[in-house]
Image (tube, helix red, strand yellow):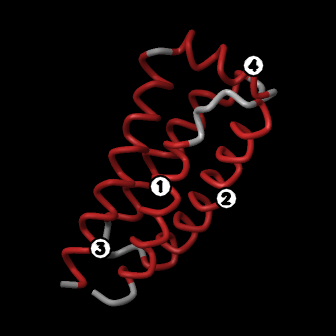
Amino acid sequence: MNKIIYYVATGIFTLVMLFSAGMYFFNHEYVKTAFTSLGYPTYLIYPYATAKLLGLFAIWNPKFHLIKEWAYAAFFFAVLLAFFAHIMVGDGEQMAAVIALVALIVSYIFSKKV
């Protein structure tokens, strides 16, 4: 049962991050506008999308134990900060961050049990 919960939570988190990274790469103008409204520099868009993909690779790869811990930590802060950024500007886009945060926490907890 623990494996099922782990894979479902990690899968949900992965889908949210892949959607996000995909938006960064393939809908750059929309993301550029969003980054500007949040007060972030737009030159971070491509490196941030690449970092998300590398972090997902680390989380799914069973050989990278230490890097996996760092990836979970980085994702935790990134998603938490995204949530508060959306709250602060009041754009109503924080729900994806909530879903990602819950899935990330569940994934992390259950990664220790499998």
Image vertical order of residue 112 relative to residue 72, above or below:
below
The residue shown at (37%, 56%) is 57
- Quadrant location of the N terminus? bottom left
When the figure is inspected, residue 105 is found, relative to residue 90, above or below; the finding is below
3D distance between C-alphas at marks 4 and 2: 20 Å
Tell me if label 2 and label 3 are in contact, CB under 8 Å. Answer: no
- Which quarter of the rendered picture does the C terminus lie within? bottom left
Helix, strand or loop at label 4? It is: helix
The residue where tag 2 is placed is: 77
Residue type, numbered disc 1: Gly
What residue type is disc 4 on? Thr
Amino acid carrying label 2: it is: Phe
Lower sequence index among marks 4 and 3: 3
- Left or right of 42? Residue 39 is right
Neighbor class of circle 2 (other Cα within 10 Å; few <14, some 14-19, many 20+) is few
Q: At 39% from the left edge and 54% from the top edge, which residue is drawn?
A: 13
The label shown at residue 55 is: 1
Q: Which mark is residue 6?
A: 3
